[in-house]
Image (tube, grey):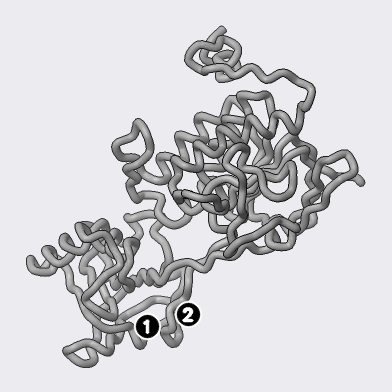
Amino acid sequence: MTGIISTDVLIVGAGPVGLFAVFELGLLDLKCHLIDILDKPGGQCAELYPEKPIYDIPGWPSISAQGLVDKLLEQVAPFKPDFTYNRMVSSLEKLDDGGFRVTTDENEVFEAKVVVIAAGGGSFQPKRPPIPGIEAFEGTSVFYSVRRMEDFRGHDLVIVGGGDSALDWTLNLQPVAKSVTLVHRRPEFRAAPDSVNKMYAMQEMKQLEFRVGHVAGLTGAEGQLASATIKGGPDGDIEVTCTRMLPFFGLTMKLGPIAEWGLDLHENLIPVDTEKFQTSVPGIFAVGDINSYPGKLKLILSGFHEVALMAQAAKRVISPGERIVFQYTTSSTSLQKKLGVSG
């Protein structure tokens, strides 16, 4: 077969855990190629909340999601990984030599000795709220994520939802927006209590509006919002000036074609062992939010731990007769040379 792209390890997903996998595998002299459905690295961090701070990355009291992605890209640069974006992995075939052949939805063919699934929750898309005619405004004045806060500066902003994303962006965008109206069906929220308390305090100071109810209609022309109609609240129907809207109704997560790979699945997650983070198919590993095991915590730092153990197991699959000597980057001159910080 011509046109095959060969690599040691094919990583499905270029989010933080997939990126750190490049580092751990690179220390073991394994070449990586990453495929992602998005148009850039970073996964959900880069796509949904690039400017949102993350507080539980070791060594970083606070770092933005995009900042974390940038640092990870800097960290893996010495290993020169290859990336293929805007692609979904459509099929996987086990080869006679024990490796795998993977095909994308654009019919690119990859062959690898090991496959690592680091696809977060799988392919994801925001849930569209049941607001008549909202499609006409999507991408112009209705957005499902915040890529740049500046894009909302000076706008009359309506945020819809009752979870952490809705509350966080209500607080973070209030200083830059002309006005902010938060809309939720009830006064109780599914968000962090501190965020809810801050929102109510800002409402008391008339820095924003909170309306109980739901958005039932939109007005505007040529993709540009002018107002939103809120119904179901104690004050009856209300018309709110609105030039930008952020609905946060959660994400629809789907494994997509990965579900057809013959792996054992449990509730749309991939069970793995906790020694190697290997799936039910030898040579295919799953790390990060997409995997499942007793005690699993869906944290980026948990995915980093999983990657470190997975890399050791992947090396044994690829080089079964080779003696693996565990080394520390702080003391190993050979590892430091690979990182370009010694010799």
In the rendered structure, which disc, 2 or 1, sits on the residue that comes first in sequence? Answer: 2
- Which residue in the structure is indicated by mark 2? 136
Residue density around tag 1, few if under 14, some if 14–19, many if 20 or more, within 10 Å: some
**Location of residue 48 in the rendering, given as x and y in whole percent from the top left corner:** 44, 57
**Location of residue 319 in the rendering, given as x and y in whole percent from the top left corner:** 76, 26
Quadrant assignment, res 250: bottom left
Image quarter where the C terminus lies is top right
Could you tell me the amino acid type at mark 1?
Gly
Q: Which residue ends up furthest to the front in the rendered image?
A: 294
Residue density around tag 2, few if under 14, some if 14–19, many if 20 or more, within 10 Å: some
Tell me, yes or no, whether the two marked residues, 2 and 1, touch with CB atoms within 8 Å.
yes
**Location of residue 184 in the rendering, given as x and y in whole percent from the top left corner:** 28, 76
**Location of residue 292 in the rendering, given as x and y in whole percent from the top left corner:** 55, 53
Residue drawn at x 48%, y 66% as measured from the top left:
251
Question: Element under label 2?
Answer: helix
Could you tell me the amino acid type at mark 2?
Ala
- Which residue in the structure is indicated by mark 1? 220
Question: Element under label 1?
Answer: strand
Would residue 15 be found to the left or right of residue 12 on screen?
left
Query: Does 213 appear above or below 306?
Result: below
Would residue 63 be found to the left or right of residue 109 on screen?
left
Residue drawn at x 35%, y 41% as measured from the top left:
56
Q: Which residue ends up furthest to the bottom in the rendered image?
A: 236
Residue drawn at x 79%, y 38% as measured from the top left:
6
**Residue 114 — which label?**
none
